[in-house]
Structures are given as C-alpha cells and as structure tokens.
Image (cartoon, rainbow, N blue to C red):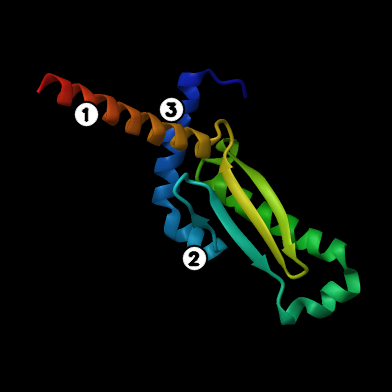
C-alpha cells in the first residue's frame, strides 16, 4: 500500500488511538506491553513445561510456537482493523528459552519520529527563551 506522508500520519493517529483503546486486551490476552512510541512487545518464555519438546524438536519447535503466536496476534489486529498498519519489526532469541517479539506501526519509524518531535520541541523552547531574554 503506497501512502503519501499525510496518509501515513493520519493512519498513525488511527493506530495510536486503537492501540490505546485495546491496550488492556493486548496486555491480558497476548501479554503485549506498549512502550512510549507505541510499539507492542513481549517476551515469549518457553519454561520448564516446554523444555522436553524444545529438547526433542529443537529450533523447529521454537519457530512453530513463535509463528503461531504471531499469527494469533495478527488475527486480533485484523479483527480491530489494524492488520495493514502493523508489522513485526523484531524477532530476537534472547537466550535458549526466551524470544523477544516487537510489533510496530508499519509506515513510519515511530521511535525516530517521537525523538525528532522531542528534540524540535526543546530547540523551539530554547529559541523562545533566548528571544524572551533578548526582548526583556
């Protein structure tokens, strides 16, 4: 889906609103947490009860469990109308029993966007303060 910059920001606003609206469901049902730039993340833990399967089937078991989890989350995103706006950006194996999965807004890097927003606000505040001092 090719979007112009205005559409990207409009959909970002819709994405943020919907993520806030369903935050409790995402946390309770899928153990997803929302960070300050509206990325949804979780760590899948393959504990003692799955160790035997993990030893027996190895990476293919881990991979199938991660894919199943992602499919379940994507089905929920489809239900709430966010499927085309969300992509998973990170799947990292932290150690042999834990996998980090991060879902985020697919059309803009929200981390950089919010970082630039903060920096530009600070710079604008400093310029305003200097202007105020000069005028007084």
Which residue of the protein is positioned furthest toward the right in this rendering?
Answer: 56
Q: Is residue 57 above or below residue 73?
A: below
Tell me which label, 2 or 3, sits earlier in the chain.
3
Find disc 1 in the rendering and name its residue. 129
Could you say where residue 26 lies in the image, as x and y percent from the top left?
A: 50, 57
Label 3, secondary structure: give it: helix
Question: Is residue 77 toward the left or the right of residue 23 in the image?
Answer: right
Q: Label 2, label 3: how many angstroms apart (C-alpha)? A: 28 Å
The tag on residue 19 is: none
Could you say where residue 32 lies in the image, as x and y percent from the top left?
A: 54, 59
Q: Is residue 121 above or below residue 68?
A: above
Q: Is residue 4 above or below residue 120?
A: above
Q: Label 3, label 1: how many angstroms apart (C-alpha)? A: 32 Å
Label 2, secondary structure: give it: helix
For image coordinates 48% across by 53% down, the residue present is 34
Disc 3 crowd rating (10 Å Cα; few below 14, some 14-19, many 20+) is few
Foreground label between 3 and 1: 1
Find disc 3 in the rendering and name its residue. 10
Q: Label 1, label 2: how many angstroms apart (C-alpha)? A: 45 Å
Tell me which label, 1 or 2, sits earlier in the chain.
2
Question: Is residue 10 toward the left or the right of residue 108 in the image?
Answer: left
Find disc 2 in the rendering and name its residue. 28
Q: Is residue 49 above or below residue 31?
A: below
For image coordinates 49% across by 65% down, the residue present is 28
Instruction: Locate the N terminus and report the quarter of the image it occupies.
Output: top right
Could you say where residue 112 lies in the image, as x and y percent from the top left?
A: 52, 35
For image coordinates 38% across by 29% down, the residue present is 120
């Amino acid at each position: 889906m090719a979007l112009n910059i205005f559409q990207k920001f409009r959909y970002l606003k819709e994405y943020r609103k919907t993520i806030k609206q369903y935050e409790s469901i995402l946390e309770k049902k899928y153990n997803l947490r929302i960070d300050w730039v509206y990325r949804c993340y979780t760590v899948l833990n393959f504990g003692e009860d799955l160790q035997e399967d993990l030893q027996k089937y190895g990476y293919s078991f881990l991979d199938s469990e991660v894919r199943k989890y992602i499919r379940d989350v994507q089905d929920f995103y489809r239900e709430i109308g966010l499927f085309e706006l969300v992509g998973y950006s990170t799947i990292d194996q932290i150690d042999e029993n834990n996998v980090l999965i991060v879902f985020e807004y697919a059309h803009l890097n929200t981390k950089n966007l919010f970082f630039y927003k903060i920096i530009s606000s600070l710079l604008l505040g400093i310029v305003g303060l200097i202007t105020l001092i000069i005028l007084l």
